[in-house]
Image: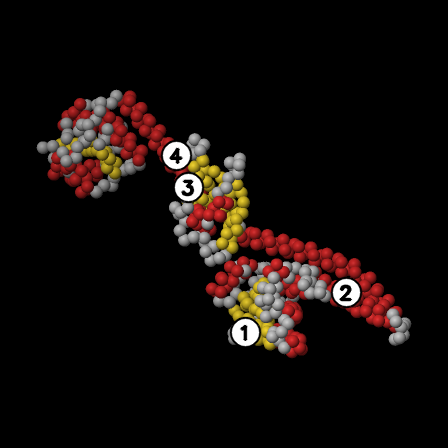
Amino acid sequence: MQKILFIDDDPEIRLLIKSALKDFGEVLVAETGEEGIALAREKRPSLVLIDIMLPGLSGYDVVMKLRQIEYFRNIPIVAVTAYGGKRDVTRAKTLGFDEYIIKPFDILMLQKRIKGYLTGEITAPPKKDINPTVREYSIELIDRLQNSIEELQSEKKFRDSIIQGLSCGLLVLDSEEKIVTINPEGIRILDAFAEKIRGEKLSSVIGSGNTESMTMINRDGLFYRNELSMFTVDGEERIIGFTTVPRMDAAGKMVGIIISFRDITDIKRFQKEMEKMNRLSTMARVASAVAHEIRNPLAGIKTMTRSIEENIGDADNNRECIVRIIKQVDRLDEILRGFFTYSRPPRPRIKRSSLMEIIREVKPLVKKKLNEKGIVLEENYEKTLPDILVDSKQIQQVILDLMLNSIDAITHDGRIVIEAKTLQPAEREAYSIIFPELRGREQFIMMTLMDNGCGMPRGISEKIFEPFFTTKYNGSGLGLSIVYRILQENNAAIFVDSGEGAGTTFIIFFETEKRWERF
């Protein structure tokens, strides 16, 4: 009958193994390493099972001592332990264990393995006679190697966690500009430009021209920093800021490129809006200062001219000149009032107001001009249009100025269309892409005022809200600037869409909920 030796300090495990293996032969058990070695010498078992963690001599010590005995040189010795790390397995096999079974184990699996060893179906590889000193040195080298591997793995995990947590996108390209690594933020940004990203060439994601720009390296080989304007699959323009550095191997050879990048579209738009606001604010201060300097002398000129007018007869040849001077002074005074309105608009008295009622108040003021030019006014409003949060008097002035502009732009067969509706969530999202200033708004009304007049070239339409810019012969360039400023003060936004010979559309967004973020 074959003998099986099991060495373990846990009595319950010893009892379990003895019961499980009793059909394969005589099962011998020992509690300590010393006891196990003595029993092995005496009984000469066909198979030895050893727990690694034993009181006194460890399982490692026991297997080394047994392997020094000629009989046990090629006898199967199996480690049965709860320690399942790679280092434990490597160390165990180096020291002479043939197999490493981790607790808790499957009894049926254990029985199958033990039967295989005892019947010869599983054979233990022949063991070389290794000097104990050499064996210990090998173990030390293995431990060092295992430590190095674990340190590298730990460093890689740490590096990967940093890359995954970066707030900017990170791309690693190989020598053929194929995407080797990309972090979640990078996928989020580039997802708008292509359906498939991982493993693809960068050119198939953002186009060859953009790839050429993003993969440039400075002559000094350090880094390259720039910005790119790109269009998503939906046609939305996005601005990407990026930094490119070469990817080097251990020999110092360039084997790819590393690109860090972020979507700076909103930052750029905010900067542009801030520059515009600063410019308008500066011009407003200048306008106010100029108006103050001019107004007093102008009042004196008008007073003296009125006095001269009263003291000359109707037949005096100078009377016509005096009348013209007074008219021009009045015109200058009107311009100065525009300066003051632009530089210091009255603080709006915000309250819930009906947009339809505001428009209804404006229509009588333009009725005569509409009739004189034969212009048809069409109106289309949503039936359940909610109230807007504005100063109704100021918005009346805005709509009046816009309608007068449209009337002036129409020469014949005129038509002005005013529409208003509440945007649904899908529409709000779409308009937020076209007009980024609207992002984050919860609910607003969109009003459009369209005419079929002469329209404006794009270069001009982009400037019409700037103060002192005008295309009219006798215009001051303040009308639409004041419109823009009033809408700002009322927490509303205005945009223009126009083309030469294609008419003009003004689009205004009014808030319907009391939220005070500024556009």
Mark 3: secondary structure: loop
Residue 234 in sight from this viewpoint:
yes
Mark 4 and mark 3 in contact? Answer it, CB < 8 Å: no
Which residue corresponds to mark 4? 151
Upstream in sequence: badge 2 or badge 1: 2
Give the mark toward the camera: 3 or 1.
Answer: 3
Going from N to C along the chain, the mark reached first, 4 or 1, is 4
Picture quadrant of residue 1: top left
Q: Tag 4: Cα neighbours inside 10 Å, few (<14), some, or many (≥20)?
A: few
Badge number at residue 332: 2
Residue assigned mark 1 = 381
Marks 2/3: CA–CA distance: 68 Å
From the image, tell me which residue sits under label 3: 176
User: Dot 3: within a 10 Å radius of its alpha carbon, few (fewer than 14), some, or many (20 or more) residues?
Assistant: few
Residue 435 picture location, percent across and down: 54, 60
Q: Residue furthest left?
A: 1
| Dot 1: element | strand
| Disc 4/disc 3 C-alpha distance (Å) | 31 Å
